[in-house]
Amino acid sequence: MPKILFVCHGNICRSPMAEFVLKDMVEKTDRTREFVIESAATSTEEIGNPVYPPARRMLAKHGIGCAGKTARQIRRSDYSNFDLIIGMDDANMRNMARAFGGDPEGKLHLLMDYSEHPGRNVADPWYTGDFDATWRDVVEGCRGLLHSLENK
């Protein structure tokens, strides 16, 4: 059972979008019980806050709910509790490596490395307001991630 943790700065936009998009993809293949999928933040800024309303609306527009999700910060124990820890951008990757004391087991990956645009950051709608671009990146990355997991 793959255990996947998506991580962004605040855990209110990109990482919860990825969490619920991948959950939706897995549900549509009737494999929900085969996965553990969560998300978290590298910062403490949004702890306890719900998914940011425009991100929630974007998910809802595509028939995906995220009720009950509130932001939480990564914990050092997440490194041992998850198989894959997927960052949304380079800053997340640096902050995760720092929080986890490195990446000795090779669990840290950038979401877009599972796409046709490896090395690229997921568009950050907090700064751009472009939730459509974020949606496209998240869907592309999650599709590639799921494909990668299916081919293991």
Image (cartoon, helix red, strand yellow):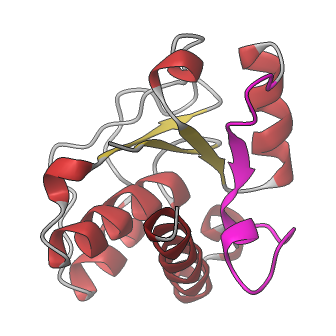
Front one among 9 and 35: 35
Residue 117 is situated, as x and y percent measured from the top left of the image, at 80, 82
User: With respect to residue 67, does 104 lie above or below?
Assistant: above
For the point 31% across and 44% down, which residue is it? 50
Residue 28 is situated, as x and y percent measured from the top left of the image, at 17, 78
Question: Which secondary structure class fits the magenta region best?
Answer: loop
Residue 136 inside the magenta-drawn segment: no
Q: Is residue 29 left or right of residue 144?
A: left
User: With respect to residue 105, does 67 lie above or below?
Assistant: below
Front one among 18 and 25: 25
Residue 51 is situated, as x and y percent measured from the top left of the image, at 35, 52
Q: Is residue 72 left or right of residue 8?
A: left
Residue 109 inside the magenta-drawn segment: yes
The number of discs equals 0
Q: Is residue 49 left or right of residue 103?
A: left
For the point 82% across and 74% down, which residue is it? 118
Front one among 48 and 152: 152
For the point 48% across and 30% down, which residue is it? 82
Magenta range is 103-122
Q: Quadrant of the N terminus?
A: top left
User: With respect to residue 76, does 5 lie above or below?
Assistant: below
For the point 56% across and 69% down, which residue is it? 148
Residue 48 is situated, as x and y percent measured from the top left of the image, at 35, 28
> Residue 141: which quarter of the image?
bottom right
